[in-house]
Amino acid sequence: MANDGEPRRISLIGAESSGKTTLARALADRLPGLWVPELLREFCDLHGRAPRSDEQSGLIRAQIEREAQVQALARRQGFGFIVCDSSPLATALYSAELYDDASLLDEAVEHQRSYALTLCTAIDMPWHADGIQRDGPRARESFDARLARELAQRGLDFTRVAGGPRQRVGEALAAMDRLGIAYNRLATR
């Protein structure tokens, strides 16, 4: 897949407390690239609550816009990658899970198809509470199962990454190699 000089977008998606942020930061450092933080986390921190059903579509649009802004910044700074800490698909799936509202899925799935690589984080690490956006191990397992079903049913290509941070970065780089996504193997920041 040629990128025509445009930074490639890598999506990290997974259940709560599954190591997405840790992997996003480590992978962005390793490639090197820029990291796009999860907008949902910022929303919860700013408002002191989880988003309501009617706020989900706005979060999706804002996450897509943030990705575009960081991609433009990466282009200007000469980075070949941006690593997206979660994606609009996660917000759409949470909307389906929490509010029984699947109306956002089709648009989010189409956006998910635009990533050069989707990495799905396994829930093989201990669950840790993290403010108001953590629902617990059972909710994590339920979301992980929903995510796996949706990815399979929609025919979305992804690589499941597991283990500790170093192993996950190694699995991400191996997935890039399999897909022919070139990166600087010697780079570190």
Image: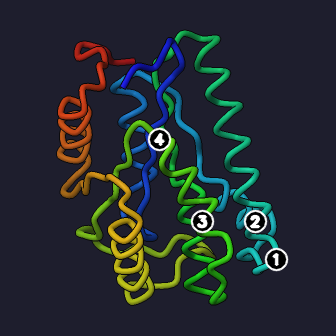
Residue under label 1: 54
Please report whichever mark, 3 or 2, sits nearer to the chain's N-terminal start.
Answer: 2
Q: Amino acid at mark 2?
A: Ser
Please report whichever mark, 4 or 3, sits nearer to the chain's N-terminal start.
Answer: 3
For image coordinates 77% across by 79% down, the residue present is 52
Element class at badge 4:
loop
Residue under label 3: 106
Residue under label 4: 115
Element class at badge 2:
helix
Disc 3 to disc 1: CB gap under 8 Å: no
Q: Which of the image's four quarters has the C terminus?
A: top left
The mark closer to the camera, 3 or 2, is 3
Q: 42 or 74, which is in the foreground?
A: 74
Element class at badge 3:
helix
140 over 61 or under it: above or below? below
For image coordinates 25% across by 57% down, the residue present is 160
Identify the disc placed on residue 57.
2
Identify the disc placed on residue 176.
none
